[in-house]
Amino acid sequence: MSGALAIDVSELTKSFGARKVVDKFSIQVPKGQVWGFLGPNGSGKTTTIRMLCGLLLPDSGSGTCLGYDIRKQAALIKRNVGYMTQKFSFYEDLSIRENLDFVARVYEMDDRVRAVDQAIERLGLVERQQQLAGTLSGGWKQRLALAACILHRPQLLLLDEPTAGVDPQARRDFWDEIHQLAAQGLTVLVSTHYMDEAERCDRIVYLAYGTVLARGTVGEVIGASTLNTWIVTGEDVRALAGELQGRPGVDQVSVFGVTLHVSGTDAGALERAIEPYRARAGFAWKKSSPSLEDVFIHLMAPFRARLTG
């Protein structure tokens, strides 16, 4: 089975001083799939990605990335992985073409001119190829970074919050390109804070403070949450939210414009809690499956209590 896995690691642990950032992390990602990596800031996502691509050595744990040992063959992993960092990391006083040519030289590509031409064309950068990187908008910087990631024809992409700060159309274009690459056999692990992006992945992994809280398809993660949700629509849902918050049986209340999500793990207790309000004029109540965001807020509740307690 390991031959069909792009990533196969077990119990990776990493600490910085007294702080344990990643605690016994395990993941098995099949080749050709797109996996989403989610979690709050400081949850260990970036550290995990850096261990997978050979930039950080784990304190303990073992495994392979593209069949290469993450401890002994980091150099080989780096040559076969495309890693896109959170921060734009290219030379702002060089043009798009010059930046890509530099990357091709780093990888000692024999056909670097052809490879740069292909990357520029694929990412729609032909008309901007002579533009300085420092003058690009966020969306165009993102395209340059992705072009650099695929330039050396990697087998795996590790993308660390690649769409942060770009507009919705740029995000959609980016994801369309990711799925085209996956259709050609490339494996992708992408970290994100956007729930709509998570829903576009084959599988998701939710990490919080170094620990995996949930994994699986979106449907599996939602189904395993044991969370029950009622959706309320009306003109003054904010006032209703204040009344429901903290009632026995109500674990969380979230406002989405004129819509309210009311959730709890005990279906009976939740229905008893909302029963006095369901006859109130001006509101429509509907029982529904929780959203992915509802589930993640629920998963984080014990951590929030620990931090504020």
Image: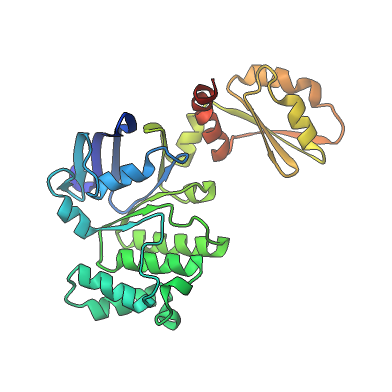
Residue that lies at the very extreme toward the left in this rendered image: 72
Q: Is residue 236 left or right of residue 103?
A: right
Q: Nearer the viewer, residue 151 or 13?
A: 13
Q: Percent position (x, y) of residue 279?
A: 84, 26
User: Compared to 144, does 127 lie above or below?
Assistant: below
| Residue visible at 68% across and 21% down in the picture | 246
Q: Percent position (x, y) of residue 143?
A: 42, 68
Q: Is residue 308 left or right of residue 231?
A: left
Q: Is residue 232 left or right of residue 185?
A: right
| Residue visible at 51% across and 61% down in the picture | 172
Residue that lies at the very extreme toward the right in this rendered image: 281
| Residue visible at 77% across and 36% down in the picture | 237
User: Compared to 191, does 96 lie above or below?
Assistant: below
Tally the marks: 0
> Which quarter of the rendered picture does the N terminus lie within?
top left
Q: Nearer the viewer, residue 85 or 177?
A: 85
Q: Nearer the viewer, residue 179 or 205?
A: 205
Is residue 308 visible in the rendered image? The answer is yes
Is residue 1 visible in the rendered image? The answer is no
Q: Is residue 215 left or right of residue 271?
A: left
What's the colour scheme?
Answer: rainbow
Q: Percent position (x, y) of residue 92?
A: 40, 71
Q: Percent position (x, y) of residue 245?
A: 70, 25
| Residue visible at 80% across and 25% down in the picture | 277
Location of residue 249 by image quarter: top right
> Which quarter of the rendered picture does the C terminus lie within?
top right
